[in-house]
Amino acid sequence: MLLVLMITAVLSVVITLYQYKNRALIATATQAQNHLLARAKLDSVKEELIYMLSTSGVWLDTPSPNMNQRYELPQQFNFWGQPFTWKEATISVLDTNGLVSVVPLDVDALLKLLINAGYEHPTHILAALQDWYDRDDAITINGAERESYSLFGLPRNALPQTVAELQLVKGMDKHWPKIRPYLTLFGTGSINTEYSPNGLLPALIGDYQTGIFLETRARYTTPSDIPIISTMPTENPFLGNRFKISIQVKVENAAYQQTFYLARGRGTKRLTYVAGKVPGQQWTE
């Protein structure tokens, strides 16, 4: 009897382990399937979004609630990076002309951003940036040349190749996470606040004007026949030629995300070009 009980117990443990293992394999397979479905849906939404931006007047004309309605876009559709839902995906579209340009360097906007981020000596950082960009070894007042860096080859003494490179500039790393989201490598040299992200506006136009600006944007993203965007504090309501786009798609317990830049060609065979593509990410809830 004791032997029978022992065999029964062992068999019960083995069966339980196999059941647990099978459930884990099924869960893994289901998650992988959902991930593939999310990725496929993201690719579909991405292509449809690029096609819409490339062939409609959304990119060429001044954005307005009327235009969103004309092209059957959600009223929350915007070009300053505020997420909205379209085709069952979460999307953000940011006109990079609303960010602080690194090449060419927008000195005025960067200075305001550094002050707002809490840098104690922002003018010293600008001087160090000048030494980073120029091709000589002469030290600008309050600047930084080779003797100020411990790593060989710094400063570059040339234009930066990436935005992340600026973190190496003397004094820049202290509050880098606060300013990194608001920098773009290629710009026009002057910022267009019409499409600046909400978090960047206080540095550019102050808290009071930002409050008014955000109220205007809130009215813009609600159903209306009045093109509210024309009341925003800028002289350039037109979009730039480069967008930063992020798309997220979720399918049950899996999701897929992708960020890329969409550039509009001028006088080229193709209408748009995808650049700076960041590999997709998978996560579970």
Image (cartoon, grey):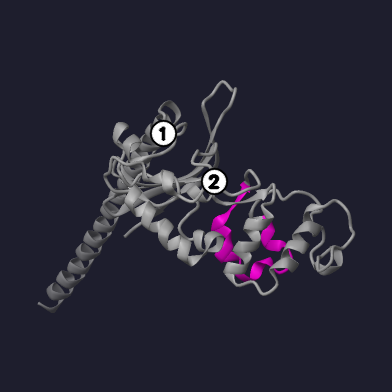
Q: Is residue 22 visible?
A: yes
In which quadrant of the rendered image does the C terminus lie?
bottom left
Mark 1 belongs to which amino acid?
A: Val
The residue under the point 79% across, 50% down is 158
The residue lying toward the viewer, choosing from 224 and 143, is 224
Q: Main secondary structure of the magenta part?
A: helix
Task: Classify 240 as above or below 156.
Answer: above
Q: Position of residue 78 (x, y in %)?
A: 40, 45
Is 173 one of the magenta-colored residues?
yes
22 on left or right of 173: left
The residue under the point 35% across, 42% down is 36
Farthest residue to the bottom: give it. Answer: 2
The residue under the point 69% across, 56% down is 107
Badge number at residue 276:
none
Mark 2 belongs to which amino acid?
A: Thr
Gap between marks 2 and 1 measured at Cα: 16 Å
Farthest residue to the left: give it. Answer: 1
Badge number at residue 58:
1
Read off the magenta span: 165-185
The residue under the point 37% across, 45% down is 228
Is 65 one of the magenta-colored residues?
no
Which is more N-terminal, label 1 or label 2?
1
Task: Classify 222 as above or below 73.
Answer: below
Badge number at residue 96:
2
SS assignment at label 2: helix
Q: Position of residue 11 (x, y in %)?
A: 19, 66
Q: Is residue 32 visible?
A: no
